[in-house]
Amino acid sequence: MDDRPWVVETLSPEETHGLGGKLAAFLEPGDVLGLRGELGSGKTCLVRGICEGLGVRDRVTSPSFLTVNEYGGRLPVYHLDLFRVERVDDLREHGYDEMIFGCGVTLIEWSERIAHALVGERVDVGIAILGPTRRRFTFRGIGARSRRFLRDARSDG
Ligand SMILES: Nc1ncnc2c1ncn2[C@@H]1O[C@H](COP(=O)(O)OP(=O)(O)O)[C@@H](O)[C@H]1O
Ligand SMILES: [Mg+2]
């Protein structure tokens, strides 16, 4: 069993989109992905790929402050952007616990903003900008289910 972080580099937005599509195939109800990376690193791009892979037909855009974009695909998708969130209590008032402990897939942009309140079972995705069109994704599975998800996804070739 290989529990080291999984590191993938992409050379275009299309490749990142494709990476998201590949991840989607292995997602299960209740999975949570936290996306960390500066503005323009590709968080929403990866989310779009995941959503397409899950069969979402709606247009996927960045949610604004404290709203959750909810999409329907093979699984329900909850898409959050915490760029401006300061209080975890605000999230709780907006149904955060119901999302992360529910039957959908929760995709959280700027998850580091609530690092202390993130659910223990999750996949952390760090995104680094290496060049104008080059991005490095580092996936870490936190918890047994998330590590299994990453093992399945990375062994897919
Ligand atoms: N390899 C790549 N992967 C993802 N986006 C890329 C890549 N190369 C260039 N880009 C560009 O970077 C930007 C990423 O935007 P977006 O996904 O909205 O980022 P974020 O949600 O992290 O702010 C887009 O303009 C996209 O075209
Ligand atoms: Mg975004």
Image: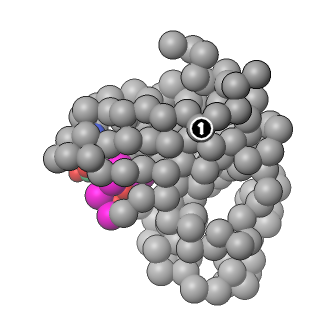
Task: Give the percent coordinates (x, y) of residue 77.
Answer: 62, 47
Residue at 54% across / 48% down in the picture?
125
Residue at 38% across / 41% down in the picture?
136
Indicate the quadrant where residue 48 lies. top left
Give left or right: position of 66 versus 75. Answer: left
Indicate the quadrant where residue 2 lies. top right
Q: What stretch is highlighted in magenta?
A: 39-43
Give left or right: position of 71 versus 133. Answer: right
Residue at 32% across / 33% down in the picture?
10
Task: Give the percent coordinates (x, y) of residue 119.
Answer: 77, 60
In this view of the protein, which residue sits in the foreground, 126 or 1? 1
On-image quarter of the N terminus: top right
Q: Name the residue under label 1.
A: 5
Magenta segment's dominant SS is loop
What secondary structure is marked by label 1? Answer: loop
Query: Is the residue indicated by label 1 positioned so its CB lies within 8 Å of ligand 1?
Result: no
- Work out whether 23 lies above or below 61: above
Indicate the quadrant where residue 72 lies. top right
Q: Which amino acid does label 1 sit on?
A: Pro
Label 1 neighbour load within 10 Å: few <14, some 14-19, many 20+: some
Residue at 75% across / 29% down in the picture?
148
Q: Which colour scheme is used?
A: one colour
Q: Which residue lies furthest to the left in this view?
A: 132
Task: Give the percent coordinates (x, y) of residue 60.
Answer: 42, 49
Residue 48 visible to an observer of this rendering: no
Residue 9 visible to an observer of this rendering: yes
In this view of the protein, which residue sits in the foreground, 91 or 126? 126
Task: Give the percent coordinates (x, y) of residue 13.
Answer: 27, 38
- Work out whether 32 lies above or below 53: below
Give left or right: position of 98 versus 8. Answer: right
Q: Residue furthest top?
A: 157
